[in-house]
Amino acid sequence: MRDHPVIKLTLIFIVGIISAKIIFINTYIVLALLIISILLLIISKRSTKNLEYFNSITFLLALLIFSIGNHYSYISQRNISPLIKDIDKVKDVTVTGTIDKIDLIRKNELIVYLSADSLYSDEFFIKEEVLLLCKIQLETHSLYRLYEKFEPGNRLRLKGFYYKGREKRNPGEFDYNAYLSSKGVAGILKIVDSASIQITSEEHDFYKNTLHQARKAIDGQLKRYHNLETFSLLRGLLLADRGEISYETKTHFVNAGVIHVLAVSGLNVGFIVLIFLLVFGRLNLFLRSGITIAGLIFYLVLTGAPASVFRATVMAVVLIIAYLSNRSTHLMNSIAIAALVVLIIDPNQFYDAGFQLSFSAVISMALLYPPIEHVINQLSIRNKILRYFILMIGLSLSAQIGTLPFTFYYFNKFSTISLLTNLIVVPTIGVITGIGIFTLIIALFIPFIGTYYAAANNLITKYLFDIINFSGSREYSFISINNYSLYDSILFYVLGFMLVVLYKKLKHRTSKIITVILIVLNILILSKADDKDIIPDNYLSILMIDIGQGDAFLIKFPNGKTALVDAGNTTTTFDNGERIIIPLLNYLGIVKIDYGIVSHIDTDHYGGFVALILEGMMGEIIKPEIDTSLSKDKRFEEFIRERGIPVRYFKEEKMEIGNTAVYFLYDDAIKTISGKSTNDRSGIFKLVYGETSYLFTGDIEKSVEKFYTDKYRNFLDSDVLKVGHHGSKTSSSDEFINYVTPKFSLISAGFKNKFGHPAFEILEKLNKQQSSIYRSDLQKAILLKSDGEEIKLINW
């Protein structure tokens, strides 16, 4: 590092960027430091032999770089206007502005980034520059017609439904709104009507439109020659757009430890360099290098210049120029140059997951791969193929070690099969990328030949996806990682750096092995210091999951057994089971739900169970007896039984689960009272743990509530009530509430839902009971914990 000051400069600049979260160094201080530094540097020309003077200048320059990083990061923060920040969701919002960027078209959706200058509705009028993500969802032909007409720079007038991105509403959930804010996006405008879209000016931005048209043309060719599976993969690899890859497939990529191949990065840049060198290998060195650099810059622009590609491109260009000038280059120095350039352009990239994963991987390879390679070389493996195979394992291992903290933090998973899958996937991705590029080129001149290459790529991609889907869907493919924190990350890198330093200094193999074992054990033990299990054993925990409009309650019994009471809705655009409940269970370290309790057959209650059953996460289903007049009930029953899930029907019975009594209060007489109402057929049950009790009521309405009050009367008395039908006025009759007398009332409802749940009169009724009301629409997920004597609200 002594001979490469750019590494020090970059590190100081990064510390300055981080410090902007705590302090702000204003312009005057930065200018003062700059002037003093320049003056001292001028004076130093005459007295370079004074060591203290030299150290003073060095310290001052370091302080200046730190201050520049701090100031630049602070002023570059993407702050959303307070006027729009507090708007959650509003119907019929009209927006005017200019198209900043157009994403490649997706199935039934076109995403346009609009630089808006005014937003207004019946509720507000805002005239301020904000960036909006506009989701246009129309019929296919209407959507494609707009896609052909829209150009960056066009002015639009749009009318639609405005809402913020989903915040972190459950433990471990991804904060999409914070992510959008980090990109400068204030909110989302959803348009579902062609009449709500008007182009008011057809002027366009030449540079942005040229880039957009090039991306469209390449995308069109990819789609023309390949099947959907290969097209979606190549669109991600060549154009950095993974929108057509399904959520399920992406999850399997994560589980198999190969998600990095879908993020356009150094791997893809390496493939581009290799392809150019192979194609133009017969040209002279300078011409070949020049064409390769031009190709890299074109690829960088074409992908939208994500941090990972920018980093890899800068490094590749630095290495090529160093080779041309016959100068040696230092890998860590090249990494530092790339990081500095990226952060000078946009300091916010430091907090981007792509930047973090990309740089941690390449730094780890630079530091860890040489000693790993040295150990492998000492084995004196004669078989070249076997030696290459082991070296690739070493390279993959070195990259994965460096990215572990970020992988744990962002995905809450550790892939147990990633070393093996990477050996298959990485070279295969290289082949697919190469054939894809060659297909695009050859198809321009001989389209007929292009179809054959595309067909070959379709076959290779099919086998690749089969391998990933198989390996990523196994129970053994990953281990859930819980409670991973900033402290754990710092601990990992500090002790990891100590390991690298000590490993180089130690000469004996035995001492090296002992050092590795001790540091790894320290990381494992010390990382447990700040762990906190929000639903611990030996307690009864009830988590009201925020799944929007619907119900989903997770119960963990004192003996560790679990139950899920309803699982929210599933639609063509959003599956609560897949997107919210499964990630939540992974975060909590719950591998399987022992009892899935379906209160009744309405999609906002049972829909999310489908994803859990498909993932093999369901032990037993308890539900109302099948209603053969309901096709959805028959389909659900058939689906359950096809997958070998045991089914039990509601009846009046008592179960004992971990010192907790579960009383099912269902009565066959309900069939007569309920008529065709699925709500009134809801199975209700009561939990009793020690001195505490909980009553779950599904969506029963007043007529059925009367039946239960007449039959059970004082037995309904409970500390906690799951308020019926999301707080609708059709439930929670006076008589029923007077018998229950809840101390806590849980209401699961969607934020500003169209049904007006919960009703004001129900809230008033519960307030008269002096019941503490907890609502998922206002307070997000609610967690209650009982030791058998008292119930506590837990701030997760």
Image (cartoon, rainbow, N blue to C red):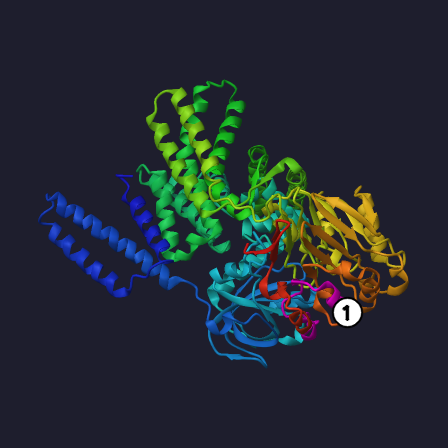
Task: Residue 505 in the image: state x and y as whole percent.
Answer: 32, 27
Q: Is 752 contained in the magenta span?
A: yes
Task: Residue 566 in the image: state x and y as whole percent.
Answer: 72, 55
Is residue 675 visible in the rendered structure shown here?
no
Residue lying at the far left in this picture: please name it. 46
- Quadrant the C terminus occupies: bottom right
Q: Compared with residue 521, is residue 71 higher up or lower down, i.e. above or below?
A: below
Q: How many marks?
A: 1
Residue at image point 55% right, 52% down: 239
> Secondary structure beneath disc 1?
helix
Residue lying at the far bottom in this picture: please name it. 122
Task: Residue 615 in the image: state x and y as whole percent.
Answer: 70, 44
Residue in front for this viewpoint, 437 or 747:
747
Q: Compared with residue 685, is residue 396 higher up or lower down, i.e. above or below?
A: above
Q: Give the range drawn in magenta.
A: 735-763
Q: Is 748 contained in the magenta span?
A: yes
Task: Residue 157 in the image: state x and y as whole percent.
Answer: 57, 76
Label 1: how many Cα within 10 Å (few below 14, some 14–19, many 20+): some
| Residue type pointed to by label 1 | Glu
Residue at image point 24% right, 65% down: 28
Q: In which quarter of the image is residue 141?
A: bottom right
Residue in front for this viewpoint, 226 or 30:
30
The answer to whether residue 705 is left or right of residue 139 is right
Q: Compared with residue 354, is residue 214 higher up or lower down, i.e. above or below?
A: below
The answer to whether residue 356 is left or right of residue 710 is left
Q: Compared with residue 626, is residue 434 higher up or lower down, i.e. above or below?
A: above
Residue placed under numbered mark 1 in the picture: 735
- Quadrant the N terminus occupies: top left
Is residue 681 visible in the rendered structure shown here?
yes
Residue in front for this viewpoint, 251 or 528:
528
Residue in front for this viewpoint, 102 or 70:
70
